[in-house]
Amino acid sequence: MKSQVIACFISLAAVVLSHGGIFFYIIDGIRYAGNTWLLDAYAGGVYPTPDPPPPSIQRRWYYAPIFDPMSKNMTCSYDGASTPTALHATIKAGSNISTDYQNPNRADSWPNDWNHSEGPMLAYMAACPGESCEGFDGSGKVWFKIDQTGLAPSAVDLRGPWIQLYTISSSLQGPGYTVTIPKNLKPGNYLIRHEIIMVRSKPPQFYPDCAQLTVTGDGTKFPGDEYLVSFPGAYSLEDPGLAMTNDWFAPGRNPVLPEWETLDYPFPGPPLWTGD
């Protein structure tokens, strides 16, 4: 029995080692540390655990992927939708927010990097009711898509390479995933939901992360109902961009199925809202 428990733990550790999430947000030159609860839980005494943990704009997240698009964890990762946090980062509409998937605090150990490279990156926002996002769980048709990034210019087909490789993959030490807040978006408090979909997997792997923003500026626009979706609920495994995923889906791998021989990746989710 003891050996089974140890084997289970090793298996879980291997899964954790394989994946990741956002460690930092960068807005107007300010670097906001992500939620450190998981680092604290797994540091094993090597790194001191702050008590209480430092405040963060980020909701709780977990390294493991989500495989079921109808899981409640699709909102903001595992337990992220219900995380109580009061801190918000201020950003002006039209400005950029960048995300860093590299962990500088454990460069000698796991999980110090993002080691996937195949799949799209997407970003959504949801307006928070009231004067704060604290306590808002992101439920309902409240999410609108503000960015979607797919294949790199050098891609030969849907096997890639993908822009993800050059922006957040540890192998190239990219600059991070940068998203522009729509310049005409009306001021208010918002959740921002960054998501990576790993398509070299059957079913695909979903990695959402959420953070709290206070948007300022002179914008007056907000997306209509045709742009709003819920998480879970926005995706189905039958969506073309998700149904075509496969375990051997990577550059140089064969066989190449006919539906992969294109540069037109069908992004899942609602149409992009630019605010123009």
Image (cartoon, rainbow, N blue to C red):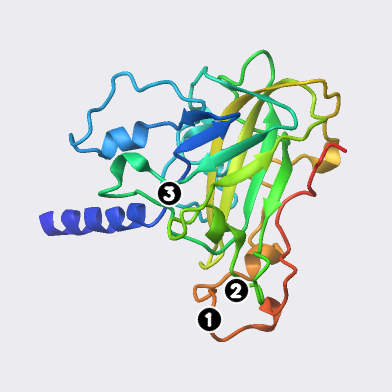
Image position, residue 235 (x, y; %): 67, 53
Q: Amino acid at mark 3?
A: Gly
Q: Label 2 belongs to which residue?
A: 159
Give the amino acid at mark 2.
Arg
Identify the residue under disc 1: 252
Residue at horizontal 42 percent and vertical 50 percent from the top: 64
Residue farthest toward the front in the current orientation of the protein: 29
Q: Quadrant of residue 216?
A: top right
Q: Which residue is mark 3?
A: 20
Query: Which picture quadrant has residue 7?
Result: bottom left
Residue 238 visible at all? no
What secondary structure is marked by label 1? Answer: loop
- Which residue appears farthest toward the left when viewing the image? 2
Q: Position of residue 172 (x, y in %)?
A: 47, 59
Local crowd at mark 1 within 10 Å, few (<14), some, or many (≥20)? few
Q: Residue at x 73, y 42 (%)?
A: 146
Q: Quick check: marks 3 and 1 in contact, CB under 8 Å?
A: no
- Return the x and y of residue 40 as percentages of the image width and height: 29, 33
| Count of marks, rendered view | 3
Distance from disc 2 to disc 1, alpha carbons, whole Å, reads 8 Å
Callout 2 touching callout 1 (CB < 8 Å): yes
Label 3 neighbour load within 10 Å: few <14, some 14-19, many 20+: many
Q: Is residue 220 left or right of residue 263?
A: right
User: Which of the pair 213/41 is nearer the observer?
Assistant: 213
Q: Is the Cβ of the residue at disc 3 closer than 8 Å to that at disc 2?
A: no
User: What residue appears at the point 49 percent right and 21 percent down from the top-left corner?
Assistant: 85
Compare residues 48 and 61 and report the one nearer the observer: 48
Q: Of the residues shown, which amino acid type is indicated by label 1?
A: Gly
Q: Between 197 and 101, which is closer to the camera in this rendering?
A: 101
Which secondary structure lies at badge 2? loop
Mark 2 Cα within 10 Å, few/some/many (few <14, many 20+)? many
